[in-house]
């Protein structure tokens, strides 16, 4: 497959009408697959896109010309570049490497949850496990909050192999605790719990048919956590100690 240099990639997009664009760079980044910076003049791309076929260059030209993904055409282009199988493979590979380094570090490397936030997740996890997963998940899966995720909203870290699979942890982006993110917080937790169930029961760790089945059974959006409308904290260093109110049914429960 042909590999493009940054200049060649830029030329290809400019030939397709993205005349505002002045710079392209490739990065080996786990969570950012592409971003437009410097008022739309700089396009930063995941390394995998060096091998973009013409159809993908067309899509990036649309994104760069629009300065983002605001129109239906731009959104369709955004989906096309996101769903490109070569990218998904590269992201998956990077994730596996990241996970083995997390495991080498002993699982949870960093958790910024306050004790009250930890209690909140224990209750909600317990509740969803009973009411949506038929209680099949272990009750002691740690739910961690991370202030280090960028665009990622969560992950499920699988452990063990074959007959001895277990879940090391579920981690969620601390931004999900902010006011106004209630729907996305619940959806992300269910999304990751569905990964846990799919991994423990089926040995799967992708968004394939068995995961989608879990997702529809437990009532979360059966899609990747890409491009969700989540409010972000104003600066990355800001601490988030907000504890959302528990669902009414849990408010009386003590454990
Ligand atoms: Zn997922």
Image (spheres, rainbow, N blue to C red):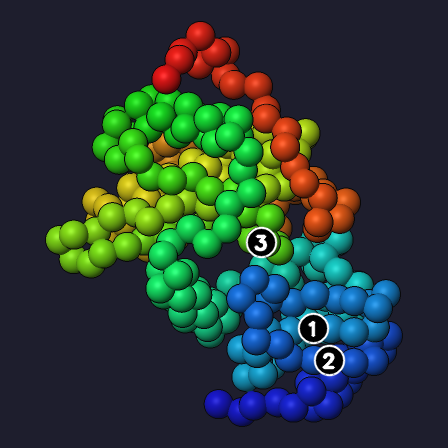
Disc number at residue 246?
none
Q: Residue furthest left?
A: 163
Disc number at residue 24?
2
Callout 2 environment at 10 Å: few (<14), some (14 to 19), or many (20+)?
some
Q: Quadrant of residue 8?
A: bottom right
For marks 2 and 3, the one nearer the N-term is 2
Residue at horizontal 26%, vertical 35%?
A: 138
Q: Quadrant of residue 66?
A: bottom right
Q: Quadrant of the C terminus?
A: top left
Q: Are marks 2 and 1 in contact (CB under 8 Å)?
A: yes
Mark 3 sits near ligand 1, with its Cβ under 8 Å away: no
Image location of residue 158, percent across then percent down: 32, 53
For marks 2 and 1, the one nearer the N-term is 2
- Tell which of 22 and 114 is nearer to you: 114
Q: Quadrant of residue 212?
A: top left
Give the answer, above or below, for where 200 lies relative to 88: above
Q: Identify the residue under disc 3.
A: 149
Q: Secondary structure at mark 1?
A: strand
Q: Secondary structure at mark 3?
A: loop
Instruction: Tell me if residue 222 can be seen.
Output: no
Image location of residue 223, percent across then percent down: 47, 47
Image location of residue 236, percent across then percent down: 70, 50
- Tell which of 122 and 67 is nearer to you: 122
Residue at horizontal 64%, vertical 29%?
A: 242
Q: Identify the residue under disc 1.
A: 44
Q: Secondary structure at mark 2?
A: strand
């Amino acid at each position: 497959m042909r590999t493009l240099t940054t200049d060649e990639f830029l030329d290809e997009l400019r030939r397709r009408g993205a005349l505002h664009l002045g710079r392209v760079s490739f990065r080996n980044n786990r969570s950012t697959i592409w971003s437009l910076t410097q008022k739309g003049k700089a396009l930063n791309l995941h390394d995998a896109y060096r091998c973009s076929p013409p159809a993908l260059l067309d899509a990036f030209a649309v994104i760069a010309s629009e300065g983002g993904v605001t129109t239906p055409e731009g959104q369709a282009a955004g989906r096309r570049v996101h769903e490109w199988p070569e990218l998904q493979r590269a992201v998956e590979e990077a994730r596996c490497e990241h996970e083995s380094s997390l495991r080498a570090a002993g699982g949870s490397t960093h958790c910024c949850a306050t004790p009250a936030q930890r209690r909140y997740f224990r209750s909600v996890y317990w509740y969803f496990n009973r009411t949506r997963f038929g209680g099949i998940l272990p009750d002691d899966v740690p739910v961690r909050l991370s202030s280090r995720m960028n665009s990622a909203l969560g992950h499920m870290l699988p452990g063990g192999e074959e007959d001895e699979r277990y879940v090391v942890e579920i981690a969620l982006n601390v931004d999900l605790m902010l006011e106004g993110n209630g729907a996305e917080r619940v959806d992300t937790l269910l999304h990751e719990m569905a990964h846990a169930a799919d991994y423990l029961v089926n040995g799967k760790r992708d968004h394939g048919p068995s995961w989608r089945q879990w997702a529809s059974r437990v009532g979360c959006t059966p899609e990747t956590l890409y491009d969700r409308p989540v409010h972000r904290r104003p600066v990355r260093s800001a601490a988030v100690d907000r504890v959302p109110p528990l669902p009414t049914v849990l408010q009386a429960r003590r454990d």
